[in-house]
Image (spheres, helix red, strand yellow):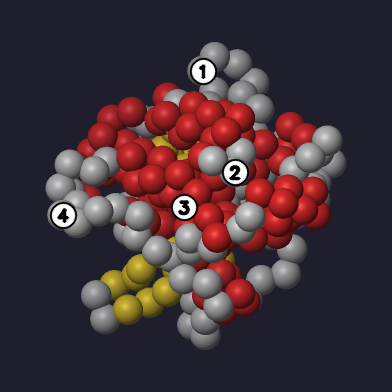
Amino acid sequence: MFRTLIAIFMTLFSVSTWAQVSGHEKGNGGYGVSCPSVDGTNVFLYDTVEAKLRYNLSVQDPRPSPYAGISLIDTALLYLNSIKNLDPNRYKKYKTWIEDFPKNARALPSAEMGPVGDIGFSILPKGCRLEQLVIQHEPVGPEDRRYLINSDLWQKMGVLDRAATMLHEVIYRDLLEINPAVRTSEKVRYLNALIFSGELGKRTPSQYRDLMKHLGFTR
């Protein structure tokens, strides 16, 4: 299943064999965490690592068993079910952005991405390191894409972390539309953690509204 997903993404996001991306234009994006293991290097979305270490929240698998036939996009959409009743309009917007993610993204094999510097402070397991996984920016032309992805890191991630990465990017996009001056992704990561851990779905409508106001997702 992982190989199939990788093949689809690499076909959709084709690009030259080498690239270097740096931060002349201000961008935003998600970070990966590379951790050595006996089998090589595992890569996780920083949001999922921070959620466990800082908030004691774990990634929950939203997929019913067996998993066969459940795509990456479907997995991300299953996570979004937690806001479907709490915030129908935001759910529809996020759903559209998730479904359109492949055509708005480009994978960069053998890429070195300069850090965009929006993480704030970080907490990592010993022996692991941060790497820029995705850069999100406004495309400068039709040849450009909103999401630039380090495909070397992407291929080492599991499906749940990939789905959480897509959530991170659409949540961030939403916040930037509301507050373009936002300086870090901390609140984006926290909301993402509440979604992929299943905790957001436990909030009452009133608690949800207070949360979104506190995090800056209201105008």
Q: Which residue, given by chain and number where applicable, does mark 4 sit on? A: 66
Q: Is residue 177 left or right of residue 81?
A: right
Marks 4/2: CA distance?
Answer: 28 Å
Residue beneath the point at 61% across and 30% down: 89
Marks 2/1: CA distance?
Answer: 37 Å
Judged from the image, the secondary structure of the residue bearing numbered disc 1 is loop
Quadrant, the C terminus: top right
The quadrant in which residue 24 appears is top right
Q: In terms of sequence position, does the residue under pointer 2 or pointer 1 come before the other?
A: 2
Q: Evaluate if marks 4 and 3 touch, with contact meaning CB atoms under 8 Å apart.
A: no
Q: Evaluate if marks 4 and 2 touch, with contact meaning CB atoms under 8 Å apart.
A: no
Q: Is residue 187 left or right of residue 156?
A: right
Disc marking residue 86: 2
In the image, 207 versus 71, the foreground residue is 207
Residue beneath the point at 40% across and 64% down: 60
Marks 4/1: CA distance?
Answer: 39 Å
Q: Amino acid at mark 1?
A: Glu
Q: In terms of sequence position, does the residue under pointer 4 or pointer 1 come before the other?
A: 4
Q: Which residue, given by chain and number where applicable, does mark 3 sit on? A: 164
Q: Which residue, given by chain and number where applicable, does mark 1 sit on? A: 143
Q: Amino acid at mark 4?
A: Pro
Disc marking residue 191: none
Q: In terms of sequence position, does the residue under pointer 1 or pointer 3 come before the other?
A: 1
Q: Can residue 110 be seen from the camera position used here?
A: no
Which is in the foreground here, disc 4 or disc 2?
2
Q: Evaluate if marks 1 and 3 touch, with contact meaning CB atoms under 8 Å apart.
A: no
Q: In terms of sequence position, does the residue under pointer 2 or pointer 3 come before the other?
A: 2
Q: Is residue 134 left or right of residue 139?
A: left
